[in-house]
Amino acid sequence: MSQEDKTTLDLHIEELIADGETTNFGTRTQERRQKARISEPFPARIWGVDSGHLPFNVDGVIDNISSTGFYLTTPIADASGSEVKLIVHLVSGPSSGVTASVQGRVVRSELQPDGKYGLAIAISKHRLL
């Protein structure tokens, strides 16, 4: 893939990895994901409509991210299938990073042991701010 074919988010994530960020693919022997993934806690604000058709606007933490999707921990209830919007600060050091506006669809929602929900979100649009 040439540099022209990569999205801005692809390039920023690759830059974070090159700057010493590590990926954590767990204990699987073969990774099925095709994009590099960063396993770092990035703060995010997420809003949308949950499965009960109620609007929400809450803070959450992105547990891992790639240029095509991410996994977010948040206190909202099931929002599977919902369209959501986020503002996320991709921190790459104590005083640097970039803020992104992201739109996506919740493809999976999992109740966590601590009572929060883990949301797997596929990115449909993004813009670096």
Image (spheres, rainbow, N blue to C red):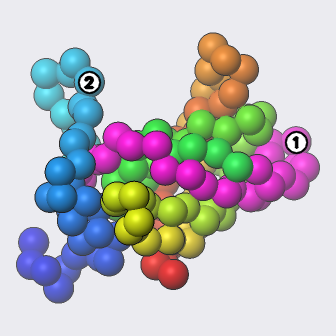
Residue drawn at the location 80% of the way across and 42% of the way down: 51
**Amino acid type, callout 2:** Gly
**Amino acid type, callout 1:** Gly
Residue nearest the viewer, comparing 106 with 91: 91
- The answer to whether one can see residue 9 in this image is yes
Residue nearest the viewer, comparing 64 with 125: 64
Q: Is residue 1 left or right of residue 65?
A: left
Q: Which residue is mark 2?
A: 26
Distance in Å between CA atoms under marks 2 and 1: 34 Å
Position in image of residue 117 (x %, y %): 66, 31
Q: Which residue is mark 1?
A: 52
Q: Find residue 94 and report its image quarter.
A: bottom left
Q: Is residue 45 left or right of residue 22?
A: right
Position in image of residue 11 (x %, y %): 24, 71
Q: Is residue 1 left or right of residue 34?
A: left
Residue range in magenta is 35-58
Give yes or no for contact between labels 2 and 1 (Cβ–Cβ under 8 Å). Answer: no
Please rate how many residues cluster around mark 2, counting C-alpha atoms within 10 Å: few if below 14, some from 14 to 19, many from 20: few
47 in the magenta segment? yes
What is the secondary structure assignment of the residue under circle 1? loop
What is the secondary structure assignment of the residue under circle 2? loop
The first of marks 2 and 1 along the sequence is 2
Position in image of residue 86 (x %, y %): 62, 62
Residue drawn at the location 72% of the way across and 42% of the way down: 79
Where does the N terminus fall, quadrant-wise? bottom left
Q: Furthest residue to the bottom?
A: 4
Residue drawn at the location 18% of the way across and 58% of the way down: 19
Q: Is residue 102 above or below residue 109?
A: below
Dot in front, 2 or 1: 2
- The answer to whether one can see residue 107 in this image is no
30 in the magenta segment? no
